[in-house]
Image: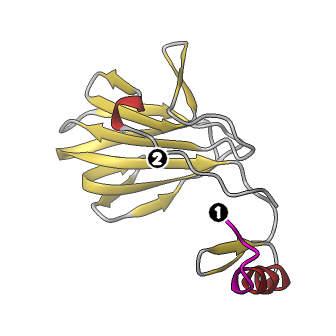
Amino acid sequence: MKEAGYRDIQPEEIPRIILAGAEILLIAGTVEFDGQPRQGAVSGGTTEPLYADVKLEPGSQVTLPVGGHLNAFTYLYQGAVSIGEQALQAGAATVLDEGDEVTLSAGPDGAQVLLIAGKPLGEPVVQYGPFVMNSREEIEQTLRDYQSGQLTA
């Protein structure tokens, strides 16, 4: 039961990490490359969010650290990529297995992949429209509060 938050992030605020064959926009989270911690435009938070936009050159490969205690998935939005033995085409999403890193191998036309991770909430989630709570009763109370004008921005 926290107040909603919002932060506008300008493109120039997003760190660019250049590696051999890859460019990473680190939107949220902290990762370590070559022993050097890198911090995204957004950091902290109880869920330890990691949000990276990874652009791979054709045939290149990159290994990205992902905290082993985080749940993670990728979304491939351009090109083709392999994660281990699993080959993905544009529009594919995959939940990652446990581990502390993921290796992405680009296809012949390169790839652009979102890597998204966060600490599991470990609690029920109920969503209705823009509202997200832990139970149907909380959603119903939120709707009553909204309809009576008690919710304010």
Q: Amino acid at mark 1?
A: Ala
Quarter placement of the C terminus: bottom right
128 vs 79, left or right, is: right
Binning the other alpha carbons within 10 Å of mark 2 as few (below 14), some (14 to 19) or many (20 upward) gives many
From the image, give the main secondary structure of the stretch colored magenta. Answer: loop
Stretch in magenta: 146-153
- Determine the image quadrant of residue 22: top left
Binning the other alpha carbons within 10 Å of mark 1 as few (below 14), some (14 to 19) or many (20 upward) gives few
Q: Is residue 7 above or below residue 36?
A: below
Direction top: furthest residue: 35
61, 123: nearer the viewer = 123
- Determine the image quadrant of residue 121: bottom right
103 vs 28, left or right, is: left
Q: Nearer the viewer, mark 2 or mark 1?
A: 1
Element class at badge 1:
loop
Residue that appears at 67% across and 35% down = 44
Element class at badge 2:
strand
Label disc, if present, on residue 115 of the rendered structure: 2
119 vs 54, left or right, is: right
- Determine the image quadrant of residue 130: bottom right
Query: Which residue does the numbered mark 1 point to in the structure image?
Result: 153
In percent of width and height, residue 73 lies at: 52, 54
Residue that appears at 72% across and 72% down = 151
Q: Is residue 76 above or below residue 141?
A: above
* First-in-chain label (2 vs 1): 2
In percent of width and height, residue 112 lies at: 29, 47
